[in-house]
Image (spheres, rainbow, N blue to C red):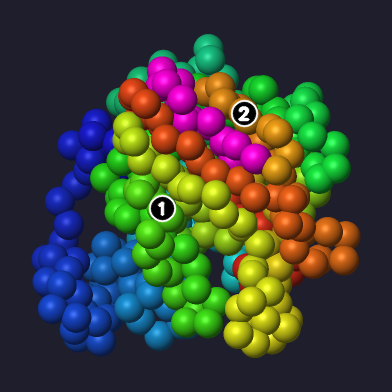
Amino acid sequence: MDQSARASAPAPSAALREAALLDGDGRHTDAVNVLARAARLGDVDAMTELGKRLVTGEHAPPMPRQGAGLLIDATNRGAVEAPALLAILAATGVECEQSWPQALALLGLAAERGSPSARGQLRALAPDGARGCAEDDGGAWRVLAASIDLRLWMSAPAETVLHDDPRIRAFAEFVPPPVCDWVIGRSRDRLGPALVYDPVARSNIRDRHRSNTAASFSLMETDLVMLLIQHRMWACCGVPLRNMETMAVLHYAPGEQITNHYDFVDPQTPNYADVIASEGQRIVTFLVYLNEGYEGGETEFPRLGVKHKGRRGEGLYFVNALPSREPDLRMLHAGRPPAGGEKWVISQFIRDRALLRVGAA
């Protein structure tokens, strides 16, 4: 959340504060019990938080249907943030029928009720002439939500071929500047060491080849802005959202970098065939450059002779695997360090099999 949204956010309820303290002590089951008791007493903030946890199974049992039900109940009782979370489920088709118009309507409802996040998202997505929405005019937020052109996000912009085989494509006008600013604002306070996925441990670990920082967003931490970015990625590369890993936003301070590496699942991984069968191969990497004003910082493919410095709002994708799904060793690449200024970029890994369960249970 950006600073303006954070400043106007309502204070958490007593149950949320107690649950946060318990979480801090690692007592996640006790935190869930606190939220459940408060939800039964009609605390809509507790309903919202508990619903979010049950959908994802984070610090709670994975019970997505019950979590979605709590979010619906909280929305019907006037909760502020619950409609924005339901909007995520509507956009992705998790535990409900997928519908982008319904997702935007729910986001408009959350904005009307005063959600800083929902209002920020709508301003970022709205056409240029519609962003000056008066905060005290509730109906204007519904109008703003209805003004968003979904056709733009479901279609691919003009592409530039950087390399034909293996395929590297760039899209000069992939996202508008307000969307770039929104993603940076959401990411800045979430940065931590950039991690890599260890398929053996099935967890993210630190890697000495990466000195930059990163922010990641799980299903219930994402928002409609990020999901629309992923949908436009789908339109460009042809692989659907359900095959996409958690979105990451990378930050490079001067001198920070990711040295030469591959994005595919390494064939040297123990039980490689089982890992590929269960989790799929990373066949595509999609980058979105969020800012300019830094020196150096190119994306480089040394074996292909390609070095590219993206402009603000530009998208770029490259294919990591051969048609057989075997790793393409030509796709060695690096995020070179900026010599001055900071660099922000979205990094999205895309698999050859579905990772996100969609559809009503």
Quarter containing the C terminus: bottom right
Q: Distance between the Cα atoms at labels 1 and 2? A: 19 Å
Q: Give coordinates of residue 55: x percent, y percent.
A: 47, 73
Q: Nearer the viewer, residue 183 or 93?
A: 183
Part of the protein shown in magenta: 287-302
The verdict on residue 291 being magenta is yes
**Tag of residue 147:** none
**Tag of residue 210:** 1
Dot 2 surroundings within 10 Å: few (below 14), some, or many (20 or more)? some
Query: Going from the N terminus, do you reach mark 1 or mark 2 first?
Result: 1
Which three-letter amino acid code belongs to the residue tagged 2? Answer: His
Dot 1 surroundings within 10 Å: few (below 14), some, or many (20 or more)? some
Secondary structure type for disc 2 = strand
Q: Nearer the viewer, residue 84 or 219?
A: 219
Quarter of the image for residue 275 reads bottom right
- Is residue 178 rendered to the left or right of residue 322? left
> What residue is shown at x 58% (from left), y 61% (from top)?
245
Q: In this rendering, does residue 141 appear at all? A: no
Q: Give coordinates of residue 87: x percent, y percent.
A: 52, 52
The verdict on residue 154 being magenta is no
Q: In this rendering, does residue 330 appear at all? A: yes
**Residue identified by numbered label 2:** 308
> What residue is shown at x 24% (from left), y 31% (from top)?
4
Which three-letter amino acid code belongs to the residue tagged 1? Answer: Arg
Q: Give coordinates of residue 15: x percent, y percent.
A: 16, 70
Q: Nearer the viewer, residue 70 or 298?
A: 298
Quarter containing the N terminus: top left
> What residue is shown at x 64% (from left), y 76% (from top)?
268
The answer to whether mark 1 and mark 2 are in CB contact below 8 A is no
Q: How many marks?
A: 2
Q: Nearer the viewer, residue 41 or 341?
A: 341
